[in-house]
Amino acid sequence: MDDLTRVFSAVADYFTLLSEPMRIRIVHAICQQEKTVSQIVAETGSTQTNISRHLGSMHRAGVLTRRKEGNHIYYGVGDETLTAICRSVCVHIASRLESEVAGQSDFITLARELTGNDRPGDRARPGGDGASPGHSASRGT
């Protein structure tokens, strides 16, 4: 296997992490600050079993951090690139849907929430404000 094939294979594995909608919801839930499993369950509306399964997979892949404090386990973003990719794609899709759908949709609302703009996609383009799409120069969305 040549180097390029190995890179493409690794990239495909990386993108597989975002192939489940619940994993995108999890990234959205923790993109600004780490949260406990219970908080993530409440924000996503899923079961603890399902969330724990996804958190375990994402942590093993190295994209989430995990720490224990007392009886609580906190998860946070361990790979800011994955968050930026997820945010960028969500904003892009919301922008496309905005032109197809009259009125508000959940995608449009999400894009506006992620970017803090009235027009989805404004900060997702290179050369926006110098920070990742939807991120201030500090750590938050």
Image (spheres, rainbow, N blue to C red):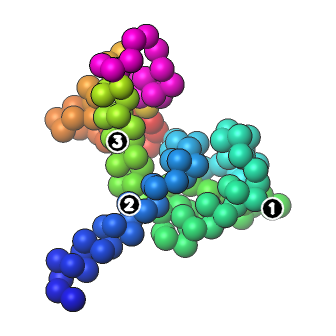
Q: Quadrant of the N terminus?
A: bottom left
- Is residue 133 toward the left or the right of residue 45 in the image? left
**Relative to residue 94, is residue 33 depicted above or below?**
below
Residue lying at the far bottom in this picture: please name it: 1
Q: Nearer the viewer, residue 57 or 63?
A: 57
CB under 8 Å between discs 2 and 3? no
Element type at mark 3:
helix
The image quarter containing residue 6 is bottom left
The image quarter containing residue 10 is bottom left
Q: Position of residue 82 (x, y in %)?
A: 39, 55
Label number found at residue 112: none
Q: Nearer the viewer, residue 23 or 39?
A: 23
Residue 72 in sight from this viewpoint: yes
Question: Which span is picked out in magenta?
Answer: 98-112
* Residue at left offset 17%, top offset 35%: 127
Instruction: Decide: few, some or many residues near mark 2? Use Cα within 10 Å; few <14, some 14-19, many ≥20.
Output: few
Residue 137 in sight from this viewpoint: no
The residue that mark 3 highlights is 89
User: Which badge, 2 or 3, comes first in the chain's sequence?
Assistant: 2
CB under 8 Å between discs 2 and 1? no
The residue that mark 2 highlights is 15
Q: Quadrant of the C terminus?
A: top left
Q: Nearer the viewer, residue 63 or 54?
A: 54
- Is residue 113 toward the left or the right of residue 34 in the image? left
User: Which badge, 1 or 3, comes first in the chain's sequence?
Assistant: 1
Q: Position of residue 110 (x, y in %)?
A: 47, 28
Q: Position of residue 115 (x, y in %)?
A: 38, 28
Instruction: Decide: few, some or many residues near mark 3? Use Cα within 10 Å; few <14, some 14-19, many ≥20.
Output: some
* Residue at left offset 39%, top offset 69%: 13
